[in-house]
Image (spheres, rainbow, N blue to C red):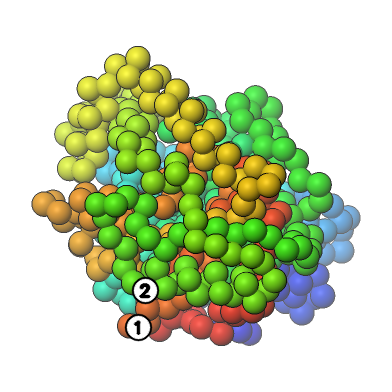
Amino acid sequence: MGDALGTLDATGQAELVRSKAASPTELVEAAIARIEALDGRLNAVIHRRFEAALAEADALAASSAGPRGADGGPGAPFAGVPVLLKDLGAPMAGEPHYAGTAFARDAGFRAPHDGFIVEKLRAAGFVVLGRTNCPELGTTVTTEPVTYGPSRNPWSTEHTTGGSSGGSAAAVSSGMVAVAHANDGGGSIRIPASNCGLVGLKPSRGRVSPGPDPSEAVWAGSTIDHVLTRTVRDSAALLDVLSGEMPGDLFVAPPPARPFAEAVSADPGPLRVAYWDAPALEHLGVAEECAHAVRATATALQELGHATERARPDALCDPTFEDHFLVLVTTAVVADLAAWSEALGRTVEVSELEPANQLFAALGAAHDGAAYLRAVLWCEAWRRQMASFFVPGGYDLLVTPVLAYPPARIGELTDPEHGLERVLATLQYTAQFNVSGQPAVSLPLHWSADGLPVGVQLVAAYGREDLLLSVAARLEEARPWSERVPPVHA
């Protein structure tokens, strides 16, 4: 059954356990076998806790005759389903947590407590197998850290997975696991989803609590956690698991009218949809394959009964957005250094960072508190402009590329001379919706002529993940992607 399990989504695996067609131990053993068989080619899983995971799975299997409930027992919705955690955020007590850095690895740092995300995953019955590769501090859109080396795309091992949740994307795309934790501060869920042919939903600001660690103010609230999946129903079900206000949360999204899992089968009704197939900035380009993917999605939405027109918010193409967003990102690198210095009990020097983050740290250090606050206030005014595009009477959805170009080859985005320039040219459509706080999803609706995935981004108004999930499910039915698997697959 092991190979067959690699093609099932998390919902399907959970159904096997509930029907007693498979045990938690069988699910975990099969996932471990898939990781061991594939990870030498993909470099997705950098920390393994297989022995502990097997013990946890055995305990779940042994409790099958016990009481049912939401404590990780057989009554939990995902009892025994394997999951991986990104090595950035979602700390797990006693487990390594390095954020892609050499200094935390060399110190052997281990998280002192569980994050709320880990608590919720385990309460739902998930079994954590380990942690996945990510770029240093999560500050770029490719997963090629010096510390662990590049993660490789299952569709072509010469190409990047994207970042910063690239290890998680490689693991899910290849079938190692059906679902893996990810987070997104400028596109880091959607970009790997686009590059690896996955569903990547960035929830609304405040939908998923990052606590209990003080991280919500990082990037001025632009970061959010969720997962990478192969199906829309898994993304919805995991949002039900992970969402909800926790004590002390700074941002709290409005509660949904019904579970997100129910939105998958809901009829969204006729919608007004804008699509944009051109560059977000006039001086930049967009690959025809990425533009074509947007137009093809607009056609699919028309066939589903929605009204589409070529339009975009003016805020999407504001030429000064990048400058203000970079103030948030680079200042956060300075704050990260201070936080790691405190955690390790010594000063972490800028020279211990990779060159790109050394540059970011230098830029961040040049901003005083007033400059940072000015950037935050500018983003607040800009956010209101973006929101006006989605008010009642306006547009219900916006469709754009996720990236301006198909997946890059490994090394192109980390090139010392041209890498940052290429990153900025590629990253035109995602960070805006981190700052606006709106939900956005990457769907695997197109493949390039040479067989590489090209995701399409759908954006809804703040708090409307239900609408995104409903439309995404209709597109999944109309343009199914489940039969397509990469060359490196379980």
Question: 435 or 66, which is in the foreground?
Answer: 435
Percent position (x, y) of residue 200? 53, 60
Question: 19 or 436, which is in the foreground?
Answer: 436
Q: Which residue is mark 2?
A: 289
Percent position (x, y) of residue 58? 68, 64
Vertical placement of residue 224 versus 283, above or below: above
Sequence-wise, the earlier of marks 1 and 2 is 2
Is residue 180 toward the left or the right of residue 392 in the image? left
Total labels: the figure holds 2
3D distance between C-alphas at marks 1 and 2: 8 Å
Give the residue at x 28% y 66%.
408
Q: Which residue is mark 1?
A: 449
Provide the secondary structure element on which disc 1 rests.
loop
The circle drawn on residue 148 is: none
Q: Nearer the viewer, mark 1 or mark 2?
A: 2
**1 and 2 marks in contact (CB < 8 Å):** yes
* Residue density around tag 1, few if under 14, some if 14–19, many if 20 or more, within 10 Å: few
